[in-house]
Amino acid sequence: MCHTSTTSCLRSLLAMAFLVGLIGCEHNARNLSVDKAGARQFCTTFLTAWKDGKKAADLKPKITGKDSDWEAGKTLESFEILPDERTDGANLFLTVRRTIKSPDGASQQQEVGYVVGTSPVVTVFRTDE
């Protein structure tokens, strides 16, 4: 118990709570660090499922992701994850060279950015969506 004024006691308790909160935030931030090798593999798994004609919902392990071209019924004919990458600590940003085919049969080669997260859940999203 505090033997000084109630205000001083309250300030001390608030300061301790603040410090405990900071330690918890730092711990959580470390847990959210992206696994770069895992992120590349999850992006490969995501794109391979599309290339193989599967749906994003069919992915095992579960990957939460979205690509509007996939959802629009375009097929992925080929892809290459390029070596350049950057991270913001929690996500890995990758560039993918890919060839897609629209339902009318027209093929298009393009370079598209993806952002991949590995913690607390696995996510793969196009950066331009």
Image: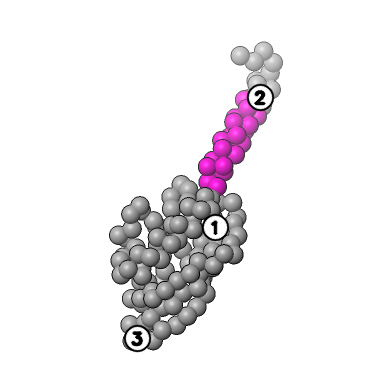
For residue 89, above or below residue 112: above
Report which residue position mark 2 lands on: 12
User: What numbered label is drawn on residue 36?
Assistant: none
Question: Label 2 amino acid?
Answer: Ser
**Helix, strand or loop under label 1:** strand
Mark positioned earlier in the residue sequence (1 or 2): 2
Disc 3/disc 2 C-alpha distance (Å) = 69 Å
The residue under the point 49% across, 55% down is 39
For residue 64, above or below residue 72: above
Question: Which of the two residues, 115 or 20, is positioned nearer the viewer here?
Answer: 115
Q: Nearer the viewer, mark 3 or mark 2?
A: 3
Report which residue position mark 3 lands on: 105
Question: Label 3 amino acid?
Answer: Gly
Q: Position of residue 25 (x, y in %)?
A: 57, 39
Report which residue position mark 1 lands on: 92
Span colored in magenta: 13-33
Disc 1/disc 2 C-alpha distance (Å) = 40 Å
Question: Which of the two residues, 9 or 69, is positioned nearer the viewer here?
Answer: 69
For residue 69, above or below residue 38: below
Q: Nearer the viewer, mark 1 or mark 2?
A: 1
